[in-house]
Image (cartoon, coloured by chain):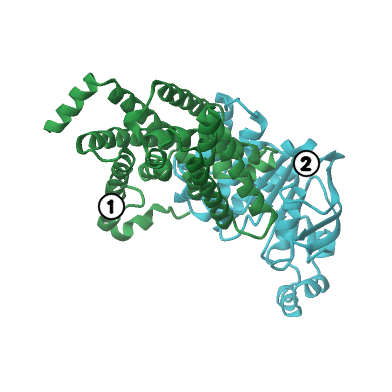
Amino acid sequence: MQSITTFITALGKYDFLQSALITAIMVGIMSGMIGSFIILRGMSMMGDAISHAVLPGVAVAYMLGINVMIGASVFGILAAGLIGLVANKSKIKTDTSIGIVFSAFYALGFILISLAESSTNLHHILFGNILAVSDTDMMTTTVVLGLVILFIVFFYKELLITSFDPTFAQTYGFKVQVLHYALMLVLTLVTVSALQTVGIILVVAMLITPAATAFLWTDRLGVMLGLAAGIGAVASVVGLYFSYTFNWASGPAIVLVAAVLFGISFVISPKQALLPSLFKGKARMGRRVPA
Amino acid sequence: MLKVQNLTVAYSDTPVFTDVAVNFNAGKITGIIGPNGAGKSTLIKAMLGLIKAQTGTVEFNGHTLKQFQKQIAYVEQRKDLDLTFPISVFDVVLTGTYGRLGLFRQPSKADRQRCLAALQRVDLADLADRQIGQLSGGQLQRVFVARAILQDAQLIILDEPFVGIDLQSETAIMAILHQWRDAGKTIIVVHHDLNKVSRYFDDLVILNHGIVDYGPVQDVYTPANIERTFSADLSAVLFTQGGAQ
């Protein structure tokens, strides 16, 4: 308990810790929300791939001195496009296509970063360094959070129907592919924001784990989005606390907290969970209503 | 009338069917039957523009697919859907308004009332708040018919709507199909089971990698056609004891 008081006192004292906390919360919220659509569309692998594929974009941005968001977006969309191209224009399945493209991009990113060297710290990109968040980073993250919320609010109908029933959306002439690439673009922006807190390797955990946890607690998409955002934020705050107190890397700390929250939900949540099904036994089958 | 002309679809160079020409009449319920893998689902997907046809045109009352796209309701096979999706019965039916609304517009209060009315029409209003995975096969099929009601389309295409559903749902769905027919809509049903063919449909299309025959059901649903498309045994079973019902 002492350490919590210490953490709160430090929050009042150090600006860098405040920035870290605010950024971590924002990243938790945005990745929870976008992650909900990623898992409902069965695109967890794609989320992982895009988050890795932005690495060369980050390197190029450092080299050219342009905004990281721009470099990352270009490579994120390029990767999404190539994955789609290989899967659609050959008999190769999507998961294989994802594996080929993202590992190639990731490898390219490594080489470019080692070429750029300079002030770029590979370790921080890979594992996150939340305590080094600058004011500019925080501003950028705020803008991305705003974009994510606007995207979901304006395209809620379309995100819902293309996630649930894309064939139906196609029959009334909706361009399912356009929304897919828009989502990939937003995913790229979220990924770059999440680089700060959890690093490239663990971005996928922030996308998937809070969203999957939320999924276990609700049957409504709107509620799931809110819960996932909340769980993402809580995991970020608690993870940051562990990171500060025990001097753990921030990324792994946040991700582990999210995983623990999932584990608890898996055991006690009413839907598809361990504990209720143990008690109710076969009664769970009774949820299906006979006609 | 939906007019299909020299439609050819191939999956990686193997044609599913070539040069299909067939008409579907307004004010009729037309069944499409044929053996497994005969191309029934492929035909309707090509007509809907969901898969690309190598050649051919599809016209509805003289309009191209793009022009009449908003006039179509498609009731797909239940097995193609994610039944764990966090969505309620009511919200599934409400997606029937999305095509008409387009971008940036939300369903209105009137839309929600029409949605509830559609659910009442299929006798599912009391299950409106259920998550869709908690319904039986027949109830789920009625949910998607309710969505088609909300779409208020001129052309309604149903893919295997009667597979694995209870009698009550079947009767309810048939009643709605009859209502649509009487309103002059064009209704196309892909059908698997050969029983009840002449009870369900006014017109019939028999498909087996191409059109075997089409026209009024009494002209097309004949022992000769069934023997030619399926087997002599099946034909014998179906047409003994009072012929084609």
Chain drawn in green: A
- Could you tell me residue A215's position as x and y percent? 40, 43
Query: Which element is circle 1 on?
Result: helix
Q: Residue at x 72, y 62 (%)?
A: B197
Task: Tell me which chain the residue with mark 2 is part of.
Answer: B
Q: Residues within 10 Å of mark 2 (few under 14, many from 20)?
A: some
- Could you tell me residue A214's position as x and y percent? 37, 41
Residue that carries the numbered disc 2 in the rendered image: B184
Query: Which element is circle 2 on?
Result: loop
Residue A25 visible in the snapshot: no
Q: Residues within 10 Å of mark 1 (few under 14, many from 20)?
A: some
Q: Say whether residue B71 is left or right of residue A228.
A: right
Q: Amino acid at mark 2?
A: Gly
What color does chain B have in the rendering?
cyan
Q: Say whether residue A235 is left or right of residue A188.
A: left
Q: CA distance from mark 2 to mark 1?
A: 51 Å
Residue that carries the numbered disc 1 in the rendered image: A276
Q: Residue furthest left?
A: A2
